[in-house]
Image: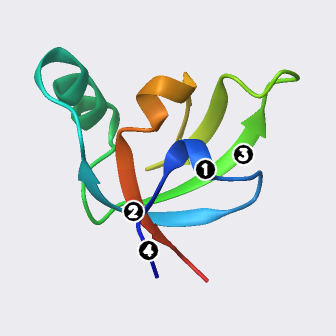
Amino acid sequence: MRDFSLSDMKKGEHMIIEKLETEGRLRRRLLDMGFVPGTRAECVLISPFGDPKAYLVRGAVIALRRKDAATVLGVREE
């Protein structure tokens, strides 16, 4: 399976986070919110225009803009 990003997910899909392709403040913020390698994420809500999307990560629902979600990569969980 190829890596894909949170921004590629459709509602109800799951993934296991493998890496963050960002640096600095955004990387720290994502890590603080629970987007840590090895963590399971689920897309739970998509706004009417598709941006932002909300993800269930470690028991919290977190909304991310497409450009930020694109930096969180992982593999689909079947």
Q: How far apart are the two marked residues, 3 and 2, measured between alpha carbons?
A: 17 Å
- The kind of secondary structure element at disc 3 is strand
| Residue 4 against residue 30 in the figure, above or below | below
**Mark 1 or mark 4: whose residue is earlier in sequence:** 4
Instruction: Determine which residue is flagged by label 1.
Output: 8
Q: How far apart are the two marked residues, 3 and 4, measured between alpha carbons?
A: 22 Å
**Mark 3 or mark 4: whose residue is earlier in sequence:** 4
Question: What is the x, y in percent for residue 33?
Answer: 34, 32
Q: Residue furthest right?
A: 48
- The reply to whether the C-beta atoms of the residues labelled 1 and 2 are less than 8 Å apart is no
Pick the residue in front: 14 or 49. Answer: 49
Q: Quadrant of residue 24?
A: top left
Residue type, mark 1 in image: Asp
Instruction: Determine which residue is flagged by label 3.
Output: 44
Q: How is the rendered protein coloured? A: rainbow
* Tag of residue 2: 4
Q: Residues within 10 Å of mark 2 (few under 14, many from 20)?
A: many
Residue type, mark 4 in image: Arg
Q: Quadrant of residue 70?
A: top left
Q: How far apart are the two marked residues, 1 and 4, measured between alpha carbons?
A: 12 Å
The residue sitting at 77% across, 28% down in the picture is: 50
**Mark 3 or mark 1: whose residue is earlier in sequence:** 1
**Mark 2 or mark 4: whose residue is earlier in sequence:** 4
**Mark 1 or mark 2: whose residue is earlier in sequence:** 1
- The kind of secondary structure element at disc 4 is loop
| Residue 28 against residue 45 in the figure, above or below | above
- The kind of secondary structure element at disc 2 is strand
* Tag of residue 74: 2
Q: Quadrant of the C terminus?
A: bottom right
- The kind of secondary structure element at disc 1 is helix
